[in-house]
Amino acid sequence: MSAARAASRGVGRPRAWRPLPRRFFERPVVELAAALIGQVLVRGRGRGLVAGRIVETEAYGGERLDPSAHSFKGPTPRCAVMFGPAGHAYVYATQGACFCLNVTAEGDRRGKAVLIRALEPVLGVPAMRSARLERLARGPTRARLLAGADHELAAGPGRLCLCLSIDRALNAVDLTDPRSPLWIARGAEPARPAPEVLWTPRVGLNPASASFGWEWRAFDAGSKAVSPAPGPGRATRRRPRPLRCPPPRA
């Protein structure tokens, strides 16, 4: 997508895509999940950039707070970065050989982070499409992407990592560093209205988890690039529930 077209969709021009400061990420994890909607995730690749507007996130509450978080039982080699400063990338591999990108939150060293679940492509769309098609066999998804369904390219946490070439090599990268190969920049210009953020329960969690029903999945109600809905009958809210992490477990 050209810079002019990106700007017309409420996304700032690439030359203004400077990393957000660390203080942006030093806020309660649920608030950060909402604040990230509309910002731009940028990946430097050689001399070019690939970028997408964040349209879907999930908050994870950390050590002794959120049983669904990788950090619930404390630091491990896998999730150690979650216990560091806010504004760093936590990248992990899934069983399907895909990767997921999280952003560390608050900076209280309690393992809180926000999962980036979906992007709306704004720059480097041909490169994103090529990366997706390379991993896809013949079928309806490949046919839709070839027909121009660009909103599906990064509609899911594994898909967006594939589109932006994000893997464990980027784990612990400082997203606030202008020299970083991966960062988050301010999206909408101040004069434009903020996206309408709605909330549902998070996706794919263990139903036996005590935090299974927490409505901590945020998404842009006006974007077609949101990943497939969690399921029929899932109502959406305008505020998350619960609004804050509960007290730590004894």
Image (spheres, rainbow, N blue to C red):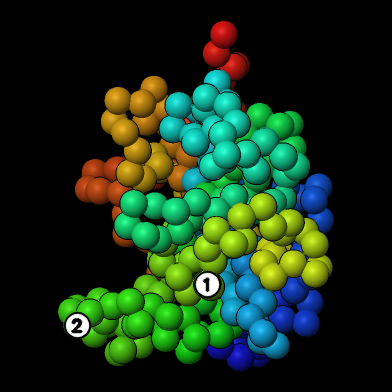
Label 1 SS: loop
- Give the residue at the far front of this rendering: 77
Would residue 140 be found to the left or right of residue 98 on screen? Answer: left
Where residue 30 sits in the image (x, y, percent)?
59, 39
Q: Look at 76% across and 50% down and name the residue there.
A: 24
**Depth order, front residue of 250/245:** 250
**With respect to residue 113, does 151 lie above or below?**
below
- Counting the numbered discs, the total is 2
Q: In which quarter of the image is the N terminus?
A: bottom right
Query: Could you tell me if residue 75 is visible in this image?
Result: yes
Answer yes or no: is residue 11 visible. no
Q: Residue at x 38, y 78 (%)?
A: 132
Image: 105 above or below 124: above
Residue 162 position, x and y percent, is 45, 70
Identify the residue position indicated by label 2 in the image.
138
Expressed as whole percent of the image width and height from the top left, the position of residue 120 reads 50, 71
Q: How far apart are marks 2 and 1 (CA)?
A: 22 Å
The tag earlier along the polypeptide, 2 or 1, is: 2
Residue 107 image-quadrant placement: top right
Please name the amino acid that badge 2 sits on: Arg
Residue 50 located left or right of residue 24: left
